[in-house]
Amino acid sequence: MEVSNDDIADTYRKLHANEHFSIEIPDTAHQISQDSWLQAGFVLTTGINSAYVLGYSGAVMVPLGWVGGVIALLVATAASLYANILIARIHEVGGKRHIRYRDLAGFIYGKKAYALTWALQYVNLFMINVGYLILAGQALKAVYVLYTDEHTMKLPYFIMIAGFTCGLFAIATPHLSALGVWLGFSTLFSFIYIVVAIVLSARDGNRSPSRDYDIPGSKVSKIFTTVGAMASSVFAFNTGMLPEIQATVREPVVKNMLKGLYFQFTVGVLPLYAVAFIGYWAYGSSSSSYLLNNVSGPDWVKTAANIAAFLQTVIALHIFASPMYEYLDTRYGIKGSALAVRNLTFRIGVRGSYLALTTFVAAIVPFIGDFMNLTGAISTFPLTFILANHMYVVAKKQELNRISKIWHWLNIIFFSCLAVAAAVAGVRVIVVDSKHYSIFADL
């Protein structure tokens, strides 16, 4: 028996009839329904192959070792693809497109879920952007260290430079679809630092004596770092903003988004695997949270890789900041020409303030591995896995058989337990690190 979207919509109306379900969903001020699936695929691939990829040797492989690390990344890839497919398939549930994650959750559950989902998503994207600014600052500092022995410039200063650059890019790029040609530059920049990281790591690995692959730490610390590394592996493949990216895709929106996801999880994951595995092979348990700090080679090559990492981070940060920009632009009616005085002034003031706050937080606590762990725990797990499975069950319950429902509920329970464990581990790591580093630390 085929169930139509109208039937599903009627079911929702009945479910929420006694809850005074009413959410006003504003039309977006940004461009939607115009981009090809390939552009969406490059947006997704830009996210997973950002400069964060340079940290997975240290953040995932070191705490888990060869067997655990490889299995964790492969399982995280399969689980993330599956969960994102679920979200993509209910983009048009109820006979309309849901262009924001919170809109979809609000339509299915009601007002409280709308607000909770927005809060989770905001935390997720804000923390990702904090991490990007730390990465960008590290890339600039790495260039600085190559050419001077004075070291008078500390990491917080480079983070501030990165924040200012991201602010200029945010002002010049009004919405997500406007990235356009910048996605090509992003791919080029990613290619540069990924190739350099792989080639120089492989060369170092061939020249080095046998490496230590033992998992560091006491028995207790290993438990917490293992759970945290699992959260980092999940964080590697997920955006936490799939409906917002899907909103940019032209019709047929579900079919095209699935093409973009398949592109991300086939072609897109190969560079990530290569950097993570080769970096760990070359340096073992001494792999850095920023792999370019490990490599040896010509200064000009390392300079090019670090500058490429910095520039790609500026573009990637804009992707993950775009839901907040869209919310603010829509809330205050910022439409029309990007160069209109009112629109330009608004972007300078509001986006500049948002990035100033993000930069300040990044400069205070530049512990990038900790952010990856905690972000995966408190927001990526709920948004990508728990909500994805539960929303799919609610939206498709008339079409799912008993076995399918049990399968989704097992996923919900498993990832809920994992999220709690990862959150505890993430908080513990931050507390431990805060004992070793002061605020505005120069890492």
Image (tube, helix red, strand yellow):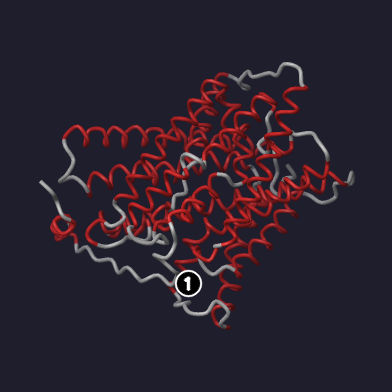
Q: Position of residue 333 (x, y in %)?
A: 44, 77
Which image quarter: residue 185?
bottom right
Residue that appears at 41% across and 66% down: 32
The answer to whether residue 82 is left or right of residue 199 is left
Which SS class for mark 1?
Answer: helix
Disc 1 marks a residue whose amino acid type is Asp
Image height of 273 relative to 119, above or below: above
Image height of 97 relative to 349, above or below: above
The answer to whether residue 403 is left or right of residue 316 is left
Image height of 363 relative to 67, above or below: below
Q: Quadrant of the C terminus?
A: top right
Residue highlighted by disc 1: 329
Residue lying furthest top: 210
183, 241: nearer the viewer: 183
The answer to whether residue 26 is left or right of residue 231 is left
Which image quarter: residue 315?
bottom right
Residue lying furthest bottom: 341
Which image quarter: residue 192?
top right
Q: Position of residue 318 (x, y in %)?
A: 56, 59
Residue lying furthest left: 1
Q: Position of residue 142 (x, y in %)?
A: 77, 45
40, 359: nearer the viewer: 40
Number of marks drawn: 1
Classed neighbour count for the residue bearing mark 1: other residues with Cα under 10 Å, few (<14), some (14–19), many (≥20): many
Q: Position of residue 87 (x, y in %)?
A: 34, 48
Residue that appears at 58% across and 77% down: 344
The answer to whether residue 47 is left or right of residue 57 is left
